[in-house]
Amino acid sequence: MKKLMGTMVAALLLSGAVARAELVDRVAAVVNRDVIALSEVEKRAAPELSRLASERDPQKRAEQRAKVLKTSLDILIGEKLMEAEIRELGLGVTDAELDAAVTDVRRQNNVTDEAAFERLLSGEGFTVKTYKEFLRNQMSRMKLVQMKVTPKVKVSEEDLKAAYTQYTKLESGDAEVHARHILVQVDAKATPEQVEAARQKALKLAEEARKPGVDFSELAKKKSEGPSASDGGDLGFFRRGVMVPAFERVAFALKEGEVSEPVRTQFGWHVLKVEERRAVDVAPFEEVKAELENRLKLQKTEKFVEQYVQELRQKASVDVKI
């Protein structure tokens, strides 16, 4: 409610004194005639901001907070600019398209009933209504990208061969690891105190896992809050580029049988144990060609989207207040 009221007041005061909207909710930026409230920026940045709780140096924490807020604000500004283009070009998403997309999400997650779907969304910080709004916005932006950006994305045979050369350098002599983990979940809206309490819980679990004779698999079954708990936290074998970066860095740095310190991801705090490492053979070009092409297309699309947003920003009125 505070966020809603802040946005409404900011809009009312926009014509003459935007700054006075700080009485309710500080204005982070004005994009043309659209207001972005600081609370919106903080909500978008919440997962990253929660990770700063472990930074004990106040100056570093303040600098990192400012950097995270700026990045999140830039993303929100880009989204506002794209939304304006979507309205102008009439690229909205119909209810039928949205319903089909929701059905596809449920199918991919093997969710058959509404109650289970609501529980799944709740775990990610959504209600059914807010998730549909989020999905509709994502689909609208995708339509805009397909119209304005996708035609520019070209991947040549030379691009693919260069990517394969790089791929072989990275994969040659590399390994894949078999790991298990124990997860202490952290809600996306958790306070810094709750994040720290979860970290302390994970620290104790890591200490327990290192004790002689402790079966990590059994400990994960009893203590892990993740979906793999019933399997003893087993993640199987995986290569680089599969897991989230923070998790992956630790997994590939551990020796066989070693237990990690708690690792923070968007899901919470993880305690990892590497069971086994093994060498990976480099796949032939034809076998990975399609994967490399998709990866290059994604990289180029992201680059062109950034350029497109910058073009929109240059033509728009953007007043940053923080």
Image (spheres, grey):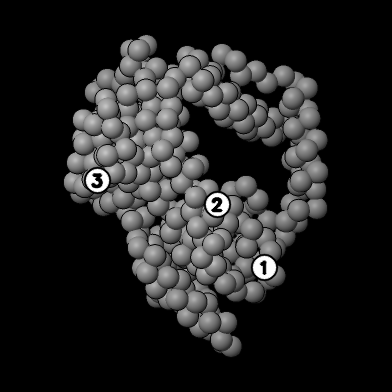
Position in image of residue 282 (x %, y %): 77, 44
* Mark 3 vs 2, N-terminal side: 3
Q: Position of residue 162 (x, y in %)?
A: 79, 30
Above or below residue 273? Residue 74 is above
Name the residue type under label 2. Val
Which of these two is toward me, 147 or 180? 147
10 Å neighbourhood of mark 3: few (<14), some, or many (≥20)? Answer: few
Q: Quadrant of residue 283?
A: top right
Residue at mark 1:
254
The residue at which mark 2 appears reads as 244
Name the element at disc 3: helix
Observer-side mark, 3 or 2, equals 3
Location of residue 31 (image quadrant):
top left
How far across and down, in percent of the image, does residue 52 sit?
49, 61
Q: Amino acid at mark 3?
A: Leu
Please name which of the two marks, 1 or 3, marks the residue nearer to the observer: 3
Question: Which residue is at 35% across, 12% downward?
Answer: 88
Quadrant hosting residue 10: top left
Position in image of residue 207 (x %, y %): 53, 82
Name the residue carrying label 3. 23
The amino acid sitting under disc 1 is: Leu
Tell me, yes or no, if residue 40 can be seen here. Answer: no
State left or right for residue 220 relative to residue 155: left
Contact (Cβ within 8 Å) of mark 1 with mark 3: no
Q: Answer yes or no: do the residues labelled 1 and 2 have beta carbons within 8 Å?
A: no
Q: Mark 2 and mark 3 in contact (Cβ < 8 Å)?
A: no
